[in-house]
Amino acid sequence: MGTRLALMTNPTNSEDEEEKLEKEEAQNEKDFKDKLEDISSRLARIERVLARLEPEMGEFQQSTRLIRDGMDFYGNLFEMMGRFSGRQRLQKRYPILAKDEMSRLIVEALEPGNPLNISQLTVAVRRGRGTASRRIIRERVKQLQNLGIIQESHQDKKAMYYKLSDDLL
């Protein structure tokens, strides 16, 4: 447009040059509109493809979620069966575990393999039983140590930690 104004104000330019510039501007405008239409049609195609893919992707995601949930279920089931059979073996070997709920809860708390101190064991037993005193937990830990069911793991500045005996794992 700036060139058009210059042509209009400059008397030396001919009408042919002005017409030529007008045609160029019209062509540029047409090219711009064509590019916009091309972009718009490409976006419409992308939207159609995504609309077709979205239900398939949803089905795919749902299928993979179901497979993963099924595998988690069976994994948890096998883990639970392993724990149950391990408990049965322990209870056959050490009848005190079948008779004494507190001792059984202490062993179950230590089952995952992470060492716990007396305070942590007391909290775990309280969760399973409702009540438990640290003194009684400490006595049961000593009994279980004497039977070879649990052993000392390590000690930090404040407390001794206990774990299941290595020969039980």
Image: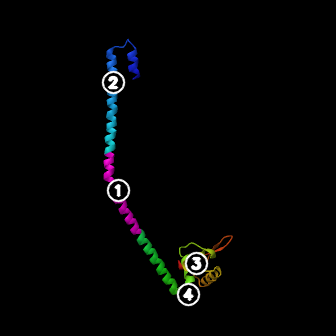
Q: Residue at x 32, y 56 (%)?
A: 55
Amino acid marked by disc 2: Glu
Answer with mark 3 or mark 2, whichever residue precedes in sequence.
Answer: 2
Q: Where does the magenta region start and end? A: 45-71
Nearest to the observer: residue 9 or residue 35: 9
Residue 96's disc number:
4
Q: Residue at x 47, y 80 (%)?
A: 84
Answer with mark 3 or mark 1, whichever residue precedes in sequence.
Answer: 1
What distance separates the C-alpha of mark 2 from that of mark 1? 48 Å
Read off the residue under disc 1: 57
Is 62 a magenta residue? Answer: yes
User: Which image quadrant: the N terminus?
Assistant: top left
Read off the residue under disc 3: 126
Residue 17's disc number:
none
Nearest to the observer: residue 144 or residue 72: 72
Mark 1 crowd level (few <14, some 14–19, many ≥20, 10 Å Cα) = few
Q: Is residue 95 left or right of residue 156?
A: left
